[in-house]
Amino acid sequence: MYNSYLKSRSLYIIILLLLLTGTSKAQQYPIYSQYIFNGLILNPAYAGSHVQLSASAMYRNQWVNFDGAPKTLFFSAHTSLMKERMGLGLIINDDRIGSYSNQNIYGSYAFIIKTPKGKLAMGVQAGLNILSADFRDLNLDDIDDISFASVSGNLKPNFGTGVYFYNKTLFAGFSVPFLLNNGYGGLNLENALNEIRSARYYYLNGGLMLPLNREKTVHLQPSVLIRGQEGAPLNFDINTSVIFYDLLNVGLSYRNIDAVVSYIDFKLSESFHFSYSYDWTTSAIRNASSGTHEFMINYRVRLKEIHDDVTCPKFNYFM
């Protein structure tokens, strides 16, 4: 009886984590804090907006000290081609929560139109979600219970789209990065998860670049992100940062569902930037966790045969 209780308790802790990080439908695409520096996380139309080749590696350790909490590795790269008329991108992430792991591999394409007011990009992405589950670390009284049979490499294709407009002083974007509600009904997971499904997301965001002095060496950069997600309440981030000489970016975010976020970015060299953010958890999870750490390093380089005669934006600028 006690072992059955432990088994059920372990399962429902996992379910709780799934619900807190996404919707009641499934393990979901993770929430990042540093999309501010890497919009490809949210929108395929962002591909090529840095002009030169831009590659980022990110690690997110969510809800530190909370057993089974999410840990995410993320890699992205994108570049413009054909004199900024198109952009290509790639994202790969490995997200682990409880006994579950979810990998995403997506390629993105953006068609970029130059207008007198700025650049308008229309993007699409397509790829695979790979869901796995390993219950061997759970304290099961029946190791042959098919409800806890491990799942390996369950592949589901998906695709999405977005639009993105940007110039020297503002940006605005809207995207639906995952259009298909893929189901995983054959995974034999307890009755509480008869059929888990991926949710559809809607992202609407925008921001400004406002100079604070005549020399335009210090800027204020406010922005907002609104997330719509099937099966979950509408939520939003309000972000504000100050940029000093394009060397240092310091900011705060308010996320209405979960956290207050502090973030900082350093220019290490002409090619490298390092970013760090800390999420101060405001939900009930704060009683069991020590917040969330997120690290990112970005590398940018001109490819001689592609970017020789084009102007590349600075790290914190939209163009």
Image (cartoon, rainbow, N blue to C red):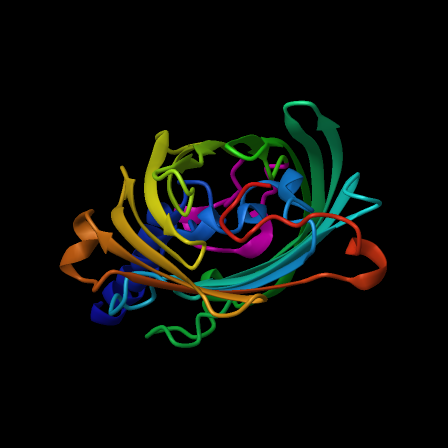
* Count of all numbered marks drawn on residues in the image: 0
| Residue 31 pos. (x, y %) | 42, 49
Q: Is residue 117 visible?
A: yes
Decide whether residue 24 is among the magenta residues.
no
Q: Which image quadrant: the N terminus?
A: bottom left
Q: Nearer the viewer, residue 257 or 190?
A: 257
Q: To which quarter of the image does residue 122 belong? A: top right
Q: In the displayed structure, does residue 293 sit left or right of residue 282?
A: right
Q: In the displayed structure, does residue 95 sit left or right of residue 138?
A: right
The residue depicted at 21 percent of the width and 64 percent of the height is: 290
Q: Residue furthest top?
A: 116
Q: Main secondary structure of the magenta part?
A: loop
| Residue 119 pos. (x, y %) | 67, 31
Range drawn in magenta: 180-200
The residue depicted at 65 percent of the width and 44 percent of the height is: 49
Decide whether residue 197 is among the magenta residues.
yes
The residue depicted at 46 percent of the width and 60 percent of the height is: 147
Q: Nearer the viewer, residue 290 or 266?
A: 266
| Residue 259 pos. (x, y %) | 25, 47
Q: Nearer the viewer, residue 30 or 47?
A: 47
Relative to residue 34, is residue 318 depicted above or below?
above
The residue depicted at 43 percent of the width and 42 percent of the height is: 216
Q: Residue furthest front?
A: 214
| Residue 50 pos. (x, y %) | 63, 49
Q: Nearer the viewer, residue 38 or 28?
A: 38
Relative to residue 1, is residue 114 depicted above or below?
above
Relative to residue 268, is residue 224 depicted above or below?
above
Q: Which image quadrant: the C terminus?
A: top right
Q: Is residue 132 visible?
A: no
Q: Residue furthest left?
A: 287
